[in-house]
Image (cartoon, grey):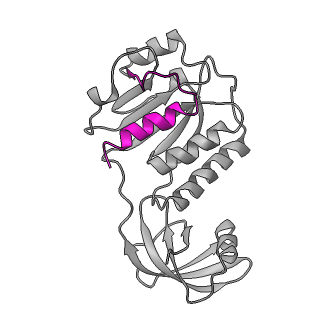
């Protein structure tokens, strides 16, 4: 039987028999799943730790859990992968965040770019995107929840290690350059793509342009395709 899985703020060092009290959305989730005292469930902290737990008490406002044993977390890539994605119209970012979480992104950095129709997002939308990441990690049985970071101008974005830029007019393949000796950053543009000046700026700072195939991909498809191609080589 598949156990209900909830996120908790933290897992203590002395885990066996530690008790936790939950409030908020996770309590509602347990109620919707109709759990009862004595039922087993899984908990994770969003930072890579997961444990088996027992539900001790549940009412409309709070739940009390007893942690039973720590479990090995789901595998992550050998180095952290950052997805840096341009702001997109409508609800496309939600789809990207959801897929990126499932595919193993360690963090998601939003970018303000020259050709983007969207120049900023409100605080409430950023909260919602982080909530979507948390829900996606829960549903995909991932023990890590990537943080979705507030937008920064592309020129101000800095990365550590290697960086790859999805671009339809280059000929370099990802597999010709990717290695797992350092952190990986993936950059994808808006509906109009990166401008020539933006590409020059990125490659001038050491980013490598890579092609994703013979077709022009939508702005919401490219980050998922690039991330999927990368994590498949390192999990």
Residue at 69% x, 22% y: name it: 117
Single out the residue that lies furthest toward the bottom: 38
Residue 35, percent across and down?
A: 63, 82
Quadrant of res 202: top left
Residue 20, percent across and down?
A: 55, 78
Q: Is residue 224 magenta?
A: yes
* Residue 17 position (above or below residue 120): below
The answer to whether residue 9 is visible is yes
The answer to whether residue 177 is visible is no
Single out the residue that lies furthest toward the front: 214
Is 1 or 75 nearer to us in this picture?
A: 1
Residue 210, percent across and down?
A: 39, 23
Residue at 40% x, 22% y: name it: 211
* Residue 63 position (above or below residue 150): below
Residue range highlighted in magenta:
209-235
Is 51 left, or right, of 150 in this rendering? left
Residue at 45% x, 47% y: name it: 103
Quadrant of res 206: top left
Q: Is residue 132 magenta?
A: no
Residue at 52% x, 24% y: name it: 156
Is 73 or 170 nearer to us in this picture?
A: 170
Is 41 left, or right, of 178 in this rendering? right
Is 105 or 47 nearer to us in this picture?
A: 105
Residue 106, percent across and down?
A: 44, 46
* Residue 36 position (above or below residue 191): below
Count every numbered label the image shows and give the total. 0
């Amino acid at each position: 039987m598949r156990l209900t899985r909830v996120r908790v703020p933290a897992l203590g060092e002395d885990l066996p028999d530690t008790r936790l009290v939950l409030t908020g959305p996770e309590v509602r989730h347990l109620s919707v799943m109709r759990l009862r005292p004595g039922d087993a469930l899984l908990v994770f902290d969003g930072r890579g730790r997961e444990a088996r737990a027992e539900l001790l008490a549940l009412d409309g406002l709070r739940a009390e859990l007893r942690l039973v044993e720590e479990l090995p977390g789901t595998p992550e890539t050998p180095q952290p992968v950052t997805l840096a994605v341009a702001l997109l119209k409508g609800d496309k970012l939600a789809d990207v965040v959801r897929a990126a979480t499932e595919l193993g992104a360690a963090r998601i950095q939003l970018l303000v770019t020259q050709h983007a129709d969207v120049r900023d997002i409100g605080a409430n939308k950023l909260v919602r995107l982080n909530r979507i990441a948390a829900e996606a990690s829960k549903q995909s049985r991932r023990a890590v929840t990537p943080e979705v970071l507030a937008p920064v101008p592309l020129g101000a974005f800095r990365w550590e290690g290697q960086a790859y830029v999805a671009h339809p007019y280059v000929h370099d393949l990802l597999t010709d350059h990717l290695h797992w000796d350092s952190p990986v950053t993936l950059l994808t543009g808006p509906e109009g793509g990166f401008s020539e000046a933006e590409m020059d700026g990125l490659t001038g700072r050491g980013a490598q342009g890579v092609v994703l195939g013979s077709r022009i991909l939508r702005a919401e498809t490219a980050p998922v395709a690039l991330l999927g191609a990368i994590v498949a080589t390192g999990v």
